[in-house]
Image (cartoon, helix red, strand yellow):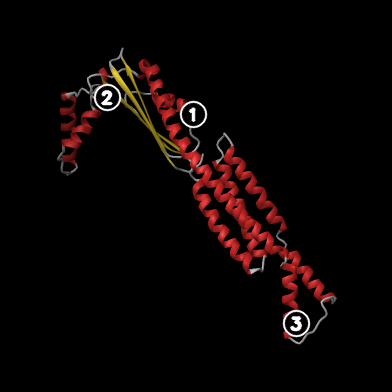
Amino acid sequence: MTGFGRGCVQADTAGVNIQVEINSVNRKTLDTQISAPREWSGFEATCNEWLKGAFQRGRVNIQIIIESVDGSKNSLKFNNQAMQESLEDLRSFASNQGLEFNPDASFLIDLARSVKDSSELPDWKELIKPLKEAFVSALSEIEVMRSKEGTALAADLRKRINELNGYREEISKYALGSSEKYRDSLLERLKQLNLDLDPSDERVLKEIALFVDRSDISEEITRLSSHFEQFLTFIKAEEATGRKMDFLCQEIHRELNTTGSKSNDIEITRIVIEAKNALERIREQVQNIE
């Protein structure tokens, strides 16, 4: 689910402010992107440890911003000599390759960041306590936002599952008289062909029995009911159930397909089509759930 959280802590001993921003967007799998000062080798592994268990699915972006107390972001102090040497090297390379080299302001800023003197940037291990404090604060904030979205999503899914169950009840109602309708239709066709057979004729009874066996959807109706109950249970669960819901949607779709292919009743076919449309809306929502 989507969300955004920010945590800010001031590390007085290091003279820096720490800001952690975490945002998440919907995605079927888990994809984590961490943006931190490049000098902080090994920090990403620790960051992933702090994040462990907080997300099961989605694209999660984490940005660590370090500012000196006087407001200079990431404690940047440009190394003029290093920048000059880098520019000369790049200009020489471009010339050898026959390329134009016209650095603009944006390029110079990126270059300055890449060659900055990092001696003023504290090692992340020295800031481990305030870093974690800011990280936990950001996680807490994003969790509140995601929880609100989850509550609204759960209510919507309950409504849609109840809608599907209504379709199941309609299908069950029409299925009750399907054998009688088929018998009457069969006898009517036989009469039109001047084949006036007794309804108790063994051949008619055998044909009706075969139809009833082929078109029996009682098992599909029972399984649909079971799937709906499981789905509602997953909605109330505390743990991540998005993938389980996704699997149930596939099973519900399969049962609806079988119901539609077995039945010759036009009303059941119509209801199955409406149920599939409703199920598709549920499947779209389920992609947003962990």
Tell me if 208 is positioned left or right of 230 in this view.
right
Residue found 71% across the figure and 65% down from its top: 215
Q: Nearer the viewer, residue 116 or 214?
A: 214
Q: Nearer the viewer, mark 3 or mark 2?
A: 3
Label 2 near label 1: C-beta < 8 Å? no
x, y (%) of residue 29? 48, 41
x, y (%) of residue 274? 56, 60
- What element does badge 2 sit on? loop
x, y (%) of residue 169? 65, 57
Alpha carbon separation for disc pair 3 and 1? 70 Å
Residue found 15% across the figure and 43% down from its top: 100
According to the picture, the residue beneath numbered tag 2 turns out to be 74
Label 2 near label 3: C-beta < 8 Å? no
Residue found 50% across the figure and 43% down from its top: 153
- What element does badge 1 sit on? loop
According to the picture, the residue beneath numbered tag 1 turns out to be 52
The mark nearer the N terminus, 3 or 1, is 1
- Identify the image quadrant of residue 180: bottom right
The mark nearer the N terminus, 3 or 2, is 2
According to the picture, the residue beneath numbered tag 3 turns out to be 190
> In the image, what residue type sits under mark 2?
Asn
Alpha carbon separation for disc pair 1 and 2? 26 Å
Question: In the figure, 280 relative to 182: above or below?
Answer: above
Q: Nearer the viewer, residue 270 or 287?
A: 270
Q: Which mark is residue 89?
A: none
Crowd rating for badge 3 (residues with CA inside 10 Å; few <14, some 14–19, many 20+): some
The mark nearer the N terminus, 1 or 2, is 1
- Identify the image quadrant of residue 92: top left
Alpha carbon separation for disc pair 3 and 2? 88 Å
Label 1 near label 3: C-beta < 8 Å? no
> In the image, what residue type sits under mark 3?
Leu
Tell me if 156 is positioned left or right of 217 in this view.
left
